Structures are given as structure tokens and as C-alpha cells.
Image (tube, rainbow, N blue to C red):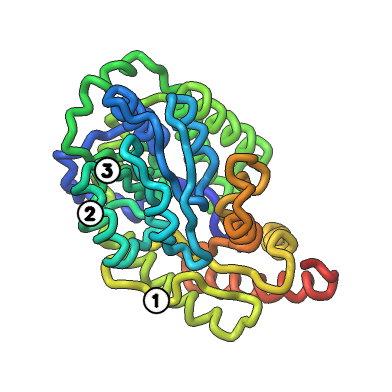
Amino acid sequence: MFVGGEFYYDVQWNTANRTLSTENMDFLNGGTACLIVISDYLIDHGINRMLLPSYLCPSIVNILEQNGVECSYYQVNRDLSIDLDDLSSQLTNDQAVYFINYFGFTHPSTTQDFFKTIQQKGVIIIEDNAQAGFTSNPIGDFVLNSMRKLVPFDGGYLISEHDMQPYLRRYHDRPNRRLPVIREYRKKLYSYLIEGNGKYEKLVDLFNSSEQFYDIDRTVLGDILEREKIEHLDWVGIKQARRENYRYLLASLVNIPEISVIFPNLPEAIMPLGLPVYINGVSRDRVNEELGNSEIGLSIHWDELLNDPRTNSNHMAVEMAKNMLTLTIDQRTTHDQLDYLVQKLCDGISIAWKSGSN
């Protein structure tokens, strides 16, 4: 039995009618594309510095710095809340502030009110919903997401009251060499996992090639066919399935002492990306290795942080990145698969204890 991994095409979630209202959004190629044009806007308006959370993927920093934005960091706590005192102490007049709605969970009202207050004073706020999809009440001057983290399609929606067309026109001639490759991968992945056809090595080659094209080409404009597919998905059903799986898996973890759930409550409006946990007392990497041996492909947010000199000087962020594991709860996942995940998670923890891995 397999659990998690990359998305494949699944007609179960297709609908005949459009299910999203996106008229006031720009559809771009993904989260990277959104960050590129946001950076262009900021630099064009004399803002070349950004204050970011200490816990983030270094690829965000790469994009911003390559586009001329200087980055500094405020403290994120172990429970993924924001240290508002630390953030406040670092605010300057020529600086934008970036925050992430981790795993689809929005920050509490006190934090949102803080951002609204500094926003009213002229601070530009960038809200990263890459892991959240669409939230009901976004507050950023720029709000971005990344669809491929949630469904088997490429794209990212950018919300802003600013006119972004002058910045988008700069990139009209960039190629998108990734799309045909990732589309072939998603077709073949379904055939491999569900029908037992094809070779694993071919899939790995396709996926790696698609990621290389994504990084090299930095395509900005979104593809109209990908947009049509995204906007004709059963988003109500997807959200319902994710929430139900989250609750089911949450109840299965309560008696595992080595597991600490980061978000033990699931607010009504949230569509979770996954169920993030800390692995305590034993090596997260050894546990994850054992899960991989059982065909369970989970995400780690974010391993790259550990080796990047721009992000690994923050002790708390490093400890978080070393011990966090994101358990799968997406719309493809059945209760049988979740039961299998919990069983193999317990087995992996037991093996890690016996081997002395910590």
C-alpha cells in the first residue's frame, strides 16, 4: 500500500462547472512567479528590504534576493505562532513584511490585527498562502498561493489592489518547458501507482527534469489549460475530505507519546495542507526512512533550512526543521491508508528506539 507522494490526475475531483471565483486575481505559473512580480513591484517603488519569518523554505529567500530584495528575519515560535515583540523591534520604514499561513492555518486574530495596524501605517504586507490555497479573509497587500501543493496542476493566484499588468508584461515571452514534462509525469504516476504499469526510474527522471525546468526558466505567466482544470475542481469536496482525514488521523495519534501535534484543533474555515507533527525522543529522519521503505512518501518542512547559512543560525528554526514531519491527509487518502500510516509510524518509532537513533 502506498500513502502520500506527488499528485497524479484523478477524475474523481473534476466538475463540469466552474467552482472558483477568481475574477480579481492574476493567474501566474506558481508561487515563484508570484514572488518575482511582487519583488519587481517593491523594487520599483523604492522598497528593497523585507522582514521574513525565521521558519521558511530558503527557496523563498533565493527568489527575493535574486530579484534585489534584502532579507532579514523575525522569530517564529515552536507552535508556528509569531513573536510579535521580536517582529516589532525590527520594523523599519523602508521594509515590507512577509508572513506564512503555515499548513493552511491562519494566525490568531491578535496577530492579524497587528498586521492590519502596521499596514495602516504604510507597511506593505505579503501574505503567503502557498500551503493554504484560498482563505476567506486575506489581509495582505499581496496574497499568493501555489496550487501544485494541493492538486495535480500548476499555477498560483496573486491578489493585489495594485495594477500588476506592467510587471506581468515583462515576462510574456518566457517558455514553460516544465508543463509537458510534469503532465506526462502525472499521467504515468497514476498508471504506476494504481494500475501497476511503468518503471519507477522513468518517473524519477521525469519529475527531476520538471523541477529543473521550473527552477531554470522561472516562467511567470500561468497556463490557461491549467487554470481551467483548477477552477473546475470540486473544491468543496476537496476541503471536506482533507478536514475529515485530518480529524481521523488526529484521533489516531493521541496515544503515541513520541508525537506532538502542532495544530491539535481544526478551526471551521481551515483547509489543511497536512497534519504537521514533531517527532520527540527519536530521530525524525530514521522514522521517515522507515516510512519510505513502506511506500509512505511524506514531506519535511524544510530540510533545506538546516544547511543554508541565511537560515540555520536561528536555533529554534533549526530544531523545528530537524524534528517536524508532515503527515498526509489530502483528498486522495482513504482511512485504510491512514491506518496503514499510523501503523508504520509506530513501527518506525519502535525501530528508531531500538537502534538508538535520536
Q: Earlier in the sequence, mark 2 or mark 3?
A: 2
Q: Is residue 303 left or right of residue 327?
A: right
Q: Residue at 45% x, 71% y: name it.
A: 263
Give amino acid for label 1.
Asn
Disc 1 and disc 3: Cα gap in Å? 31 Å
Q: Is residue 18 above or below residue 290?
A: above
How packed mark 1 is, by other alpha carbons closer than 10 Å (few <14, some 14-19, many 20 or more), is few
Q: Residue at 29% x, 40% y: name it.
A: 157
Disc 2 and disc 3: Cα gap in Å? 9 Å
Q: Residue at 52% x, 52% y: name it.
A: 55
Residue of label 1:
265
- Percent of width and height locating residue 65: 48, 29
Q: Secondary structure at mark 1?
A: loop
Q: Earlier in the sequence, mark 1 or mark 3?
A: 3
Residue of label 2:
116
- The furthest residue to the right: 355
Residue 210 can be seen in this image: yes
Q: In this view of the protein, which residue sits in the foreground, 32 or 13?
A: 32
Q: Is residue 55 above or below residue 202?
A: below
Q: In this view of the protein, which residue sits in the foreground, 68 or 120?
A: 120
Residue 123's mark?
A: 3
Disc 2 and disc 1: Cα gap in Å? 25 Å
Q: Quadrant of residue 13?
A: bottom left
Q: Secondary structure at mark 3?
A: loop
Q: Secondary structure at mark 2?
A: helix
Give amino acid for label 3.
Val
- The furthest residue to the top: 173
How packed mark 2 is, by other alpha carbons closer than 10 Å (few <14, some 14-19, many 20 or more), is some
Q: Earlier in the sequence, mark 2 or mark 1?
A: 2
Q: Is residue 334 above or below residue 117?
A: below
- Percent of width and height locating residue 15: 24, 50
Residue 295 can be seen in this image: no
